[in-house]
Amino acid sequence: MTNKKTRPNIKIWCEGKTEKDYFDSLLKYLRSENIQIDIQNLKNNSSYKKILISIKREPYKDKLIIIIDLDRAKKDNNELKNLKKLINHIKNSKDEIHLFLTLDNFEDWLRFHFIDKTENSKASFYKKLGYKDTKDFKSNTKNLYCQILRKNGNIENAEKYFSKIEIFCDKQCNINEDSLNNKIQSNLYYFREIIEKYNNFEIENKLLELIKQNGNIVSESDFLMLEQRLNIDDNALEICFKQLIEQNKIIPVWVNPSTNLCVSEKDFEHYEIGYSVI
């Protein structure tokens, strides 16, 4: 069992109850057993300026994810300036901070969880979930992602749609002001990727330790053991191997399964693909 005291802490700041209820619900369906996540509704402290003040006040030790709407920056030049200041601070900060922005607002992200007529309007989205209007919807957002799943929607639909649209702020905090001409946009399409990266980081460390314990080398014969020890499937294991290769911590090798030693020949009949600690 993972020791909770050693798990990375991730703070998620969002600007409303709808957002908090959605992410509370969504995270039940994402792999996050190796990270500690705390979601906070900023309520009246969600302006771009107040968020920047909060970050500047004290160096942020935890990993921080900020989820806010982009409409204020589109409608008000002063708000746009404040948002740019926030983004530039994040870009130059040594802290791990991720900013997610949705235009017009968060409900535009939600309605594209479906690929039917709910895409056309928020009213259609409310109706799909069984609500009369905005007020009725906002009074019933508990387990929101679960509600969406029950109506055959899912986050993959929204990710696919928004990944094709220009965004105001990318992963590297580069600003594309022209994107404000879009009616809608959201960079939440890579939110899951961030969460999975942090979760997999802990798994990758455990995998590296298991390889070292196995004599600094593993082959296909060991993969099932690794999956069982790490409690992951073969796809997740493959992703972890790729990440460790990119980090220059392991290299792919050919292994003689009888001796568990590296060999130089590429002989599929007698040797197995494997990985060795650098």
Image (tube, grey):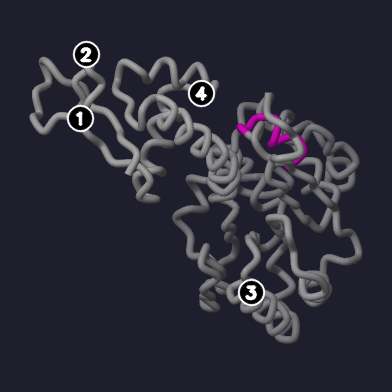
> Tags 1 and 4 in contact by the CB under 8 Å rule?
no
Location of mark 1 (residue): 262
SS label for mark 1: strand
Which of pointers 4 and 3 indicates the residue nearer the eye? 4
Amino acid at pointer 2: Ser
Location of mark 3 (residue): 87
Residue drawn at x 72%, y 47% is: 9
Q: Position of residue 257 (x, y in %)?
A: 23, 16
Location of mark 4 (residue): 232
> Tags 2 and 4 in contact by the CB under 8 Å rule?
no
**Callout count:** 4
Label 1: how many Cα within 10 Å (few below 14, some 14–19, many 20+): many
Of 17 and 37, the residue lying toward us: 37
Q: Give the range drawn in magenta.
A: 23-31
Q: Disc 2 or 3, which lies upstream in sequence?
A: 3
Residue drawn at x 55%, y 70% is: 173
Q: Position of residue 106 (x, y in %)?
A: 71, 54
- What numbered label is drawn on residue 258? 2
